[in-house]
Image (tube, rainbow, N blue to C red):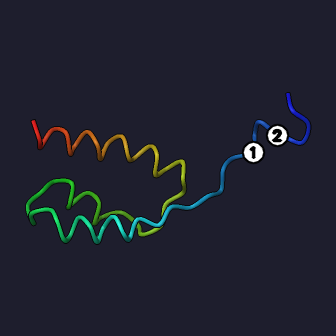
Amino acid sequence: MRKGKNPQTRCTAKVDIKPLKSLILAKFPSNHTLRFVLLAERDVLEAEEFLTKLETWLNILRSRIE
C-alpha cells in the first residue's frame, strides 16, 4: 500500500449535471424516458453516484435506440 493513501477514503468530487439537463431539454423529445429520469435528478451529484447512475442512463438510451 502506498504511503499517505487510505483505502477507506471516499471520493468527495461532485458532478454538476445542469449542462446535461440542458442538452436533454434541447435535443430529446418531451416523451423520452431519459428526459424524465434525468430531469428528476438533483443538479449536483456525488461522483460515485453519477457514475452508478450513468450506466442506467446509458441503458435507457440504448433501449430507445434499438
Q: Which residue is mark 2?
A: 6
Q: Which residue is mark 1?
A: 9
State the SS at label 1. Answer: loop
- Above or below residue 3? Residue 45 is below
**Residue at (87%, 32%) from the top-left corner?**
2
Q: Nearer the viewer, residue 54 or 23?
A: 23
Q: Is residue 64 left or right of residue 8?
A: left
Q: Quadrant of residue 31?
A: bottom left
Q: What x and y, as percent, mark residue 59? A: 25, 39
Q: What x and y, as percent, mark residue 34? A: 21, 54
State the SS at label 2. Answer: loop
Residue 42 got which mark? none
Number of disc labels: 2
Q: What x and y, as percent, mark residue 51? A: 46, 46
**Residue at (25%, 57%) from the top-left corner?**
37
Quick check: marks 1 and 2 in contact, CB under 8 Å?
yes
Q: Residues within 10 Å of mark 2 (few under 14, many from 20)?
A: few
**Residue at (9%, 63%) from the top-left corner?**
29
Q: Which quarter of the rendering shows the N terminus?
A: top right
Q: Which quarter of the rendering shows the C terminus?
A: top left
**Residue at (26%, 67%) from the top-left corner?**
23
